[in-house]
């Protein structure tokens, strides 16, 4: 039984870790709500019980718009960041790439959002561009750092046994790159969800960020936390999807044998 069960333990642990994290967050939230009036900080249970009142017919439309913006911004930033990290390694300019990415990443999101609003105006362009600008540097730096950890002696061993560039990519670079891509996908998607809300808060008249802004204006904390709960569920769902994709299609790079 041991040989059959043990190989599954780590994947299952990674699969349930986001669920445990969400449960811990809900527990802390519930504990904190005990020290405040319900209109200031309602508990998660009170939010769930008030679902019929908090849910509005146009919520799904706002959610769909937010999801489209997240997916568009994430796909561009993931492709661009990964490509920049690989290109920086190939051209041996990773420190220069990291320096440039750091300069972009330190710009506060609110300031960047206002700048984009003044440049392109109100609409979906601001949250999508905000995702790309703030997420791409993180993915590029993580990719470059992963490739920089390669073992030069292993590269020499592969070449000494008649290995080609294809063997180097398959046996040396991919085992380093794929785990980094998984980490980048999880972090990048969480960042995209967070940033899109900021962009919608600043520059759109639809989406979850817009709804949070409207709830803020009327100091409706129940609505704010209801939308926050939806955002947490979105991040959890994306994380589980990413883990499933890498587990089922790229399992050999994480759980050999």
Image: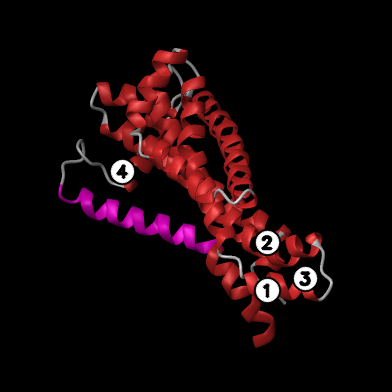
Which residue is the site of mark 3? 159
The disc at residue 228 is none
Q: Nearer the viewer, residue 247 or 101?
A: 101
Who comes first in sequence, dot 3 or dot 1? 1
Q: Secondary structure at mark 2?
A: helix
Q: Residue at x 24, y 55 (%)?
A: 31
Name which of mark 3 and mark 2 comes first in the sequence: 3
Residue for badge 2: 173
Q: Position of residue 152 (x, y in %)?
A: 63, 70
Most frequent secondary structure within the magenta stretch: helix
Q: Which mark is residue 154?
A: 1
Label 3 close to label 2 by CB (< 8 Å): no
Marks 2 and 4 close (CB-CB < 8 Å): no
Q: Residue at x 74, y 64 (%)?
A: 168
Q: Secondary structure at mark 1?
A: helix
- Badge 4 vs badge 3, beta-carbon distance below 8 Å: no
Magenta-drawn segment: 15-35
Membership of 22 in magenta stretch: yes
Contact between labelled residues 1 and 4, with CB atoms less than 8 Å apart: no
Identify the secondary structure beneath mark 4.
helix
**Callout 3 touching callout 1 (CB < 8 Å):** no
78 versus 58 height, above or below: below
């Amino acid at each position: 039984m041991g040989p059959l069960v043990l190989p599954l333990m780590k994947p299952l642990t990674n699969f349930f870790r986001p669920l445990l994290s969400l449960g811990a967050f809900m527990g802390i939230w519930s504990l904190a709500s005990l020290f405040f009036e319900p209109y200031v900080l309602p508990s998660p249970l009170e939010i769930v019980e008030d679902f019929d009142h908090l849910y509005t017919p146009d919520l799904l439309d706002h959610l769909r718009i937010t999801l489209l913006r997240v997916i568009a911004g994430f796909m561009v930033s993931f492709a661009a960041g990964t490509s920049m990290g690989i290109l920086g390694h190939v051209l041996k300019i990773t420190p220069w790439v990291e320096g440039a990415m750091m300069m972009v990443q330190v710009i506060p999101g609110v300031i960047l959002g206002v700048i984009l609003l003044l440049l392109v105006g109100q609409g979906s362009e601001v949250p999508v561009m905000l995702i790309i600008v703030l997420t791409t540097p993180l993915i590029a730096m993580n990719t470059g750092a992963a490739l920089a950890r390669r073992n030069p002696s292993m590269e020499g061993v592969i070449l000494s046994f008649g290995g080609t560039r294809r063997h180097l990519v398959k046996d040396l670079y991919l085992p380093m790159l794929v785990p980094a891509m998984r980490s980048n996908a999880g972090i990048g998607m969480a960042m995209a969800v967070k940033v899109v809300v900021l962009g919608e808060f600043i520059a759109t008249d639809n989406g979850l960020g817009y709804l949070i802004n409207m709830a803020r204006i009327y100091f409706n904390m129940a609505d704010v936390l209801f939308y926050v709960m939806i955002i947490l569920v979105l991040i959890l769902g994306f994380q589980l999807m990413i883990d499933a994709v890498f587990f089922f299609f790229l399992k050999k790079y994480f759980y050999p044998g």
